[in-house]
Amino acid sequence: MPMQTDLNHRTSASVPTPSLGAYYQRIRSLSERIAAPLSAEDCSVQSMPDASPTKWHLAHTTWFFETFLLKQRSGYEAFDQRYESLFNSYYNSVGHAFPRDRRGQISRPSLDEVWMYRRHVDRLVLDWLEANELTEYQREVLVLGLNHEQQHQELMFTDIKHVLFSNPDLPAYQSSSDAADTAEATPMQWRTERETITDIGHDASRTAFAYDNEGPRHRELIHRHQIGSRCVTNGEYLEFIRDGGYQNPMLWLSLGWDAVNRNGWQAPLYWLSLEDRYDQFTLAGRIPLRLDDPVCHVSYFEADAFARWSGKRLPTEFEWEFAARDASPGNALADRLLASNHVIHPYQQAISDWLGNVWEWTSSQYQAYPGYAPAAGALGEYNGKFMCNQFVLRGGSCATSSDHIRVTYRNFFPPETRWQFSGIRLADH
Ligand code: AVJ
Ligand code: FE
């Protein structure tokens, strides 16, 4: 790979070099803590093509630092050449990537060998940081790698949740002793926004990190509209189910109706139907459905159908960003919460719920902002090439690190996706 100077992912300027090492260790060790409650067997299962084994996440995030940093130094010898393909996710320009839907078949290397891989890469990265020899570009790649690892930390939670749910015993990832307090849902309020032209996207003059797909900052016309003060609750979604929402083709997009029938959807993922009520599967195991909590694990199609049934619609990503402009994170992932065994689950918050809790489907197709240019070289494959057939989700979830959420953040998934912590906010007119 040729030397690059412009990453377009901004930036490392806000992190002074000495503390980069501490930052690196903080993020890397969180992955280890997330995996700590799991057995080697838990870490090797792939329960569906979209979800990866924990072991693969631990290795792939390490591969990222090895491939895009260590291998760029002369004289570096690969830890294991077989890992080049096994733990490459989708970077075609650096070589063949082992197929995603077969990651569960990688029984070798063992989990122990992956831990050794992590230690090897960590030692070299930390020594290098200690020597203070990184260029500004390399520091940016390092910060990108740490943000990348935070994305995979959320995926570790969503993927292991699916693994455990696939086990007939419905085992828990965490103990349920510290289940989060949930507040009563406040009545929905409709905030009216006047027509306006507003700046959207990450401001490149600010030093904080953002992905390339969050820029360039540009102007958007926002039409007069109303937007809901909080996300849709399980109780409200239950009314849609009881009203025959899943049986009424008039409520669904054509592709959504196909998905309902092909997959036999009758409720959100992880709802367990009993005679007259529902339980839900959480990372703390099976609990009764809590009606005041935000509905979660719905696809874009379900969010869209629910909105139509309500006589409303989903907000555009620009309406969302404008409305959330002053928000700060609520129920999000934080080191201290993991330490206290706080249950990683969305719950009704007394405060505003724009950031944290559940990702919110928007009606916006995931597309480039005007003037967008992916980074040169392999790292240009990070975000840009997925700008087709996916929808934007905003706001982060209970499994997103609180320092990884911001109002300009654009997550994206295909419209059938349900295993992420994805929920619904409504807009009107
Ligand atoms: C933005 C969550 C769709 O899951 O592939 C991980 C995050 N990017 N490694 C994904 C990501 C590169 C990405 N999503
Ligand atoms: Fe990745």
Image: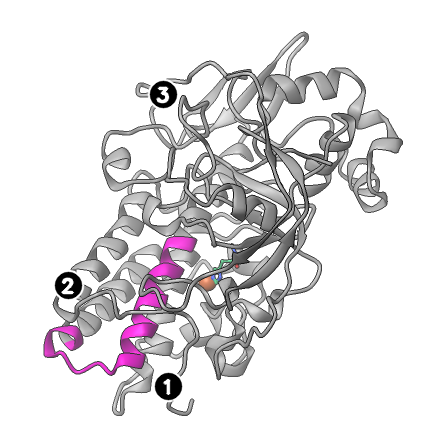
Residues packed near mark 1 inside 10 Å, few (<14), some (14 to 19) or many (20 plus):
few
Residues packed near mark 3 inside 10 Å, few (<14), some (14 to 19) or many (20 plus):
some
- Position of 211 relative to 156 (above/below): below
The residue pinned by badge 3 equals 179
Amino acid of disc 3: Ala
Q: Quadrant of residue 240?
A: top right
- On the image, the x and y values in percent for residue 36 come to 28, 43
The residue pinned by badge 2 equals 19
Q: Assess mark 2: CB under 8 A from ligand 2?
A: no
Q: Identify the residue shown where x is 27% and y is 74%.
A: 139
The residue pinned by badge 1 equals 5
Magenta residues?
A: 128-151
Q: Secondary structure at mark 3?
A: loop
Is the magenta region chiefly helix, strand or loop? helix
Cβ atoms at labels 2 and 3 below 8 Å apart: no
> How many angstroms separate mark 1 from mark 3 (CA)?
47 Å
Q: Which quadrant is home to the C terminus?
A: top right
- On the image, the x and y values in percent for residue 200 come to 53, 57
Residues packed near mark 2 inside 10 Å, few (<14), some (14 to 19) or many (20 plus):
few
- On the image, the x and y values in percent for residue 403 come to 32, 49
> How many angstroms separate mark 2 from mark 1 (CA)?
22 Å
Q: Secondary structure at mark 1?
A: loop
Q: Assess mark 1: CB under 8 A from ligand 1?
A: no
Is 300 in the magenta? no
Q: Identify the residue shown where x is 35% and y is 30%.
A: 174
Amino acid of disc 2: Ser
First-in-chain label (1 vs 3) = 1
Seen as rendered, the residue at the extreme top is 276
Q: Secondary structure at mark 2?
A: helix
First-in-chain label (2 vs 3) = 2
